Each structure stands twice: as structure tokens, then as C-alpha cells.
Image (cartoon, helix red, strand yellow):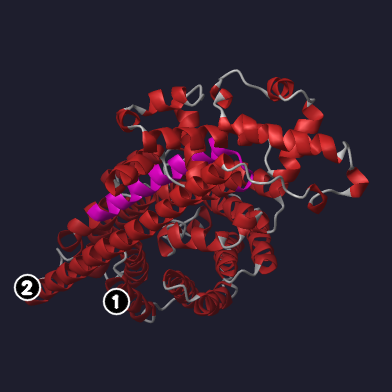
Amino acid sequence: MKNQTGLHFLWFNKMQLSAGIGMLICILFSPAHAQHKRDDDKKFDSIYFTTAVTIAAKDINKAIHIADSLYRNSKPELNKLKALMLSSSLFQQKGDIKKSVQFAVKADEIAVKNDFYDWEARIAGFLSTQYRIMGLYEEGEEYLEKGKTVSLKIENDQMKKLYLGLIYQETAYYEIEYKHFKKAHKAAKQADIYFKQLVYSEQDKNYFLATNEQLLGRICIGLKKWDDALSHYNNSQERLTTVTQENAMLSGFIYSGLGRIYLEKNDKAASFENLKKAEKIVEQSDYLELKIEVYQTLADYYKLSNDITRYSKYNDKYVHALELSEKKKKESIADFVNTTKSHEKDLAQNRNLWLVLSMGLCLALVGIFIWHRRSRKRERARFREVMNRMRQERLENQLAASTPDISEKKDPNRKIMSDAIETKIINDLKEFERGSKFTDKQISLSMLAGMLNTNTKYLSHVLNTYLNKDFNSYINELRIKYIIEKIETNEKFKNYKLSVLADECGFSSHSKFSAVFKSVTGFPPSTFLAYLKERQ
């Protein structure tokens, strides 16, 4: 389990954090809010809430269609604003930040025109979330401050406390981005205080407290306080059961967080159970952020379980979701000024913003370039280490290094064969490794045991005790080292397709060859070949 150390860093460094106010913006008008409204408004709010919470988790495109229909068929300005924000939130879930911001800005124009201070506050918080997701923290924090200012204008004390709670939640997400987990914990606790003062709807109160418990669990993971994190996620799950409307999205984040915690606590059974529940939700959703988190954690789980095939499958899914998310972010940043500042008339301020953004993007590109250069340098150093290690192993094998002292690893209480037989099997294995019979696709444990004039029990014992490998790992590693030596010493092998190389060293499929190659060397075959050609 040596690879388990530091998994939480990988998870936090690469994942896209929860959408903060963006996830909650459409929950504020559940049927519980509609008690004193006209029947038409009650119907609108009911459809609005069901679409945001239930339908969006199962069919995001259907939810977008419903939101558009609500907008086109609504007459009151407030309902039009709500429909626009529903669309904005749904596009955010799809990872299309550009459209998300466009709808939010259009809704903000209605809020400002009609002095809807509560909606001004929540839209400011929503836009703050979008800029945070894009990495534009300074601009995002400006909207966060605007949200605080506008919240103070709200006359309804309960709504004021709700929005201040959401603002502090969003503040916590910013602190998570900066890796200031203690500050994030303080902000989330402040949000908790405001949410606990809500009295107008027990259902909504429990929902917001559930989201905050999930946030606190995420923060405790960053602090490596696994037991505290587990307690918060369990509290979140318990709170969510009191909410009558289904919320698969929040449940997905809860199951994913529990899966990560149990993985860190080395409880693989509990980790797997929660991760499969999260995966079931993910497969029915287009929410990129949740896909990234769940697929990455599943990849880590199978990596620690030494299941290379499933590790490769989920790692590919994680990379695909991450690349799609990054692509959409880049598109959003490119269109950033036009979609966020179209309602401002101060051209001088717009020009300054262009300048700031251009400088920020240039700095980001420079940072990416430097990071890429350093990353390539580290990879080259790791490549040299791999090649030197393999050459050293070949040299030792050619020199027939002395047989290890079997007494060093022998457990007298579990002796199953004599020292003489054990020594013979070890020496016979060395001789076997000098040949190429391991490239036979039909080779098996019993076949190798027959070649060495021993039985499978003795052979497995020696492989496990002295090489710390099972039969399949032993044979596959020999094949990879064999093909690397061929590539290094025979020029024509450098030009072969991967399928030919896989067949040459005994693998039945290209995908299996690639997965094992990466597990042995740390590099995909194509990358390894590129570095080898570059070096030579």
C-alpha cells in the first residue's frame, strides 16, 4: 500500500471543486416557498424545482428544454428571471460556462431593472462561482463582495441570512482553491451558523445544511482529518434524507467523498460500495465536475488494487472528462469580456478589463509553458532512471549474480520445501529469464513449473517470497523488459506499430500491452518510444 500516501493531494490538486452557489441557485424556490402564491406561480415553482433537482440529474438536455419553455411561456418578470437562472445553472452543470454566464448576465439585467435585491445577490454569487471555476479569482471575488453588499439591502431577515450563508459557502470554496483549508473551514462554519437560523422551511433548511456538511467533509479531506470528514459526510447524507425531493447530484458528491475517505482509511470494501453508487449517478448525468471527481477516485481505487485494466479504463474516462472541461473553460475565457460586461456602459472600464484579462491570460500561458517544460524535464529524468535500472538488471543477470541467502527471507514456521530445492528453482528461473520462452502466448504457471521440473505450489512460493510477484506480473514484466531491449538494440523495432511490438513479446492484445507497459515503466509505449528516439 505504499502508493496510498498522498492520494488526497492528487485528488485535491486535479479535481474541479464543487460549484458553490452555482449548485444551490436553483433550489431557492421549492414548493415550500409557494404557500401564499397564486396557483400559476405555485405551478411554475414546482416545475422549476423538480427540473433543477431531479430531472437535471438524469437528463440534463431535457432539463434545459424545460427551462427554455418556462422562459418563453412566462409573463411575470420574476418568473422570466428564474427561468434564465435555471438555464444558467444547467449549462454550468454541463461545463458550458460561456452559455451559463450569458444567461446569468441576462437575468441580472432584469434583477437590476426591477430592484430584485435578493436575485441581484444570488446572481452575483453565481457569477463569482463561474469566475472561480475559470480561475479568474480576482474578478470572482469582486462579485462575491457585490453579493455581500446587495444582501444587506434585503429587508426579509430570513432571506438575508440565507444569502449570507451562501456567500460564506462560496468564500470557503475560494479558500479551498488557494489550499487554505483552515480558512475554508472557518468560512463554512460561519455559513452553518446562518443556515441553522432559517425557520421558514425545514425542508430547505435541511437541504442547505446538507450541502454545508458535504462542504465541511471536503475541507476535512484537505486537512487529512479522515474521521471528521466521515462524520460530516454522514451528517450530510442524514440531512438529505429529510428532503422530500430527490437530489441525485448532491448524493453523488457524498458517495464520492465517502469513497475517497474509506480508500484513505484502507477500507476497500466500503470505498468500492460508495464509489459504485456514485458511478451509477454519474452515468445518468452530464455534470462534468462530478464525472471528474468520481472517475479519478475510481482510478485511484483500482490502481491501489493493482487492477491495471480497470485502472486504465477509469483513468481514460477521468482524463477525457477533464480535457472536455478544460476545453470548455478555454472557450469561456476567450469570450469572457463580451459575455460578462455587455451591460456596462463605461468603455474605459471595459478597456482596462481587457488589459487585465490579456495580461492574466498571458501570465497563465507563460505559467503553463514553464510547467510543461519542467514536467518534461522531470519525465526525461524518470525515463533515464528507468533505462539505467533495466540495463543494470540485464547486466546482473548476464553476470549470473550469486543466489540470495534464502535464510534471510525464510520463515521457519512456514517451510514448505528444502533449501536445496528452493535454491535450484531460483537458479532455474534466472536461466529461464535469459531466454525468450516467456514470449509464448500460451505460457502458464503449470507450463513453467514443468519446464523447471517442479510443481506450481513450489514455483508460486518462490515467486511470491523472493520476487514479490505473482506469475502473471512476473511474466508480463519479463516481456516488457524483453521488448525494451529489442527496441533499444535493434533499429527496426523503433518503427514497428504497437500491435506488432505487443505480438512480438507475447501479448494477445494492444490494449493489454499498453496497460502493462505503463505499469512497469511509468510511461505509455508511444511516450517511451518518443523519449528513446529523442535520446538517441
**Which secondary structure dominates the residues rendered in magenta?**
helix
Q: In which quarter of the image is residue 455?
A: top right
Counting from the top left corner in percent of width and height, residue 218 is at: 56, 64
Q: Quadrant of the N terminus?
A: bottom right
Instruction: Tell me the SS state at disc 1.
Output: helix
The quadrant of the picture occupied by the C terminus is top left
Q: How crowded is mark 1: few (under 14 residues within 10 Å), some or many (20 or more)?
A: some
Which numbered disc covers residue 405?
none
* Residue that numbered label 2 is attached to: 347
What x and y, as percent, mark residue 478? 56, 35
- Residue for point 48% across, 31% down: 513
State yes or no: residue 332 in magenta.
no
Residue 107 percent across, percent down from the top left: 27, 59
In this view, 411 is above or below 484: below
Amino acid type of the residue that numbered disc 1 sits on in the rendered structure: Glu
Magenta stretch: give its range: 304-330
Q: Is residue 315 above or below residue 122?
A: above
Q: Answer whether residue 268 is visible to the viewer in this image.
A: yes
Which secondary structure lies at badge 2? helix
- Lower position in the chain sequence, tag 2 or tag 1: 1
Q: Name the residue under label 1.
A: 142
The front one of 44 and 176 is 176
Left of 430 or right of it: where is 10?
A: left
Disc 2 marks a residue whose amino acid type is Leu
